[in-house]
Amino acid sequence: MRSSSAAIGATVLRSALGEAVARTLTVRVLSALVLAPPVLVLLWLGPPWTDLLLFMAAGIMVWEWARMCGARSVGWLEAVSILAVTAAVAVGATLGIASAFAVVVLGALAAGAVAALRRRREADDGSFGWFGLGVVYVAVPLLAFQWLRGLETGQALIVWLVLVVWATDIGAFAVGRTVRGPKLWPAVSPSKTWAGGVGGVIAAGAVGAALVRFSGAEHLVAATLFAIVTSIAAQIGDFFESFVKRRFHRKDSSGLIPGHGGLLDRVDGLIGGTLAVASVIALKEVVL
């Protein structure tokens, strides 16, 4: 009976979304089911497990950024970039975020200097200048995430953030592929539609509000608006990475995660969402 129901469900899915889309969605769901539980557990446990997760993510993300920018192996420039970001996360966990940002600045300058030296020796199309940006692009959101997790309400806040961004991704994908319609920004990401963007925002608002309601917290309207802002920021983060990949003629940042490409492809929205949430909370602390 269960196998028959699963077969019927698969047939309906293929009919509604198309064979290729249904296959892609199936791979994505399976990847998420494998990867999501351990990630959520480490985030829930907090330091030092969260810091270890961020440390590993830092190395992978910078390696993928270097790969997108044309690196074929891990040379001096790539090694400096990886060292800068992983060191920033380690310093953030031990000495604090302020010290970690100093490491980011020094790391970006070091990566830029090594890039300039290598550019003098090799013919280049200007891509080496992106390595310094890569240090900032990867390190700052990781440190923001680290800071959020260290807050008094960090445990619940981080889970809320991750689930809102995931809801954005799932809602945008499902609605966009089903409704289709006008493209949102075809020059950067030809597959994304206005319908998908709106679907992602609605899904994020619903999930964000539901989580707050479930926790028994007040300010439901404010939480919904916060989730919508986070969703929009997540989609902006998605578009930025799409822009970088198009700039360097890349389809994916890597092939580490089946159905998703690389880690950067999976967390590009989380990068934007994390920066938005951290900015709002930091501004609130300054004002209040």
Image (cartoon, rainbow, N blue to C red):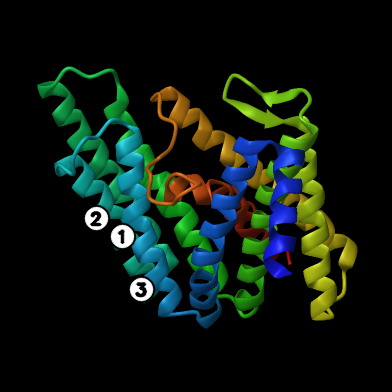
Tags 2 and 1 touching, CB below 8 Å: yes
Residue drawn where x is 27% and y is 52% of the image: 82
Q: Give the label, 1 or 3, closer to the camera.
A: 1
Q: Nearer the viewer, residue 273 or 109?
A: 273
Q: Whole-Å distance between the Cαs marked 2 and 3?
A: 17 Å
User: Which amino acid, mark 2?
Assistant: Leu
Q: Whole-Å distance between the Cαs marked 2 and 1?
A: 5 Å
Q: Is residue 125 above or below residue 113?
A: above
Side of 56 where 226 appears, left or right: right
Which residue has dot 3 on it? Answer: 95
- Circle 3 — which element? loop
Assign the N terminus to one quadrant of the image.
bottom right
The label on residue 65 is none
Side of 97 where 166 appears, left or right: right
Which residue has dot 1 on it? Answer: 86
User: Residue most toward the left?
Assistant: 121
- Circle 2 — which element? helix
User: Which amino acid, mark 1?
Assistant: Thr
Between disc 1 and disc 3, whose residue precedes?
1
Residue 255, image x, y percentages: 38, 45
